[in-house]
Amino acid sequence: MEKNVRKSCSRGFSFLEALVAVLVLALGLLGVAAMQLKALQSSHVSFQRTVATMAAQDAVERLWVDLGNKTLKACPDADPVGWKNDWADHLTLRDVTTITEDPVFCEYGITVGWVDDRFEGEDVSTLEYRIKLPKN
């Protein structure tokens, strides 16, 4: 009789083990899905930052062209011609400002921004570049 009692106590135990294993697997897959979502968000921010860097580099190149066209020893205008219009579809271009103007260098600040609502509370949408150009 003692054999029958032991057999009935272990009945259903392997089914419970299988349910726990499925639960652990489901939680693991949810974690992988969350990591994949965060990776996609970070990839998109990286893309936007690359476009912002290209826009800032374009502004720098336009400032160099303006500097080359100047015959007097003067700093180029702080707003490169057509820069904001050319990049307006891709980013929110905030500003190109003259920071300092001394006898040797012209220093500029280029601020590029974009809107990204997916990262609430994180400042991932503004970049500021500073450059110095020599006067002619």
Image (spheres, rainbow, N blue to C red):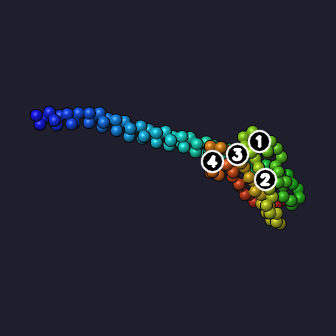
Distance between the Cα atoms at labels 1 and 4? 23 Å
Q: Which percent across, then down, holds residue 23?
A: 38, 38
Left or right, 12 with reference to 69: left
Residue matched to label 3: 114
Closest to the camera, between mark 2 and mark 3, is 3
Answer with mark 2 or mark 1, whichever residue precedes in sequence: 1
Left or right of 112? Residue 73 is right
Q: Which label was assigned to residue 96?
A: 2
Task: Tell whether 42 sits left or right of 19.
Answer: right
Q: Are marks 3 and 1 in contact (CB under 8 Å)?
A: no
Which numbered disc flags the more N-terminal residue, 2 or 4? 2
The residues bearing labels 2 and 4 have C-alpha atoms spaced at a distance of 27 Å
Q: Which residue is mark 1?
A: 88
Q: Which amino acid lies under the numbered mark 4 shown in the image of this protein? A: Glu
Distance from label 2 to label 1 (Cα)? 14 Å
Helix, strand or loop for disc 4 = loop
Does 104 appear above or below 10?
Answer: below
Q: Secondary structure at mark 2?
A: strand
Label disc, if present, on residue 120 of the rendered structure: 4
**Amino acid type of disc 2?**
Val
The first of marks 1 and 4 along the sequence is 1
Which of the two residues, 69 or 111, is positioned nearer the viewer here? Answer: 111
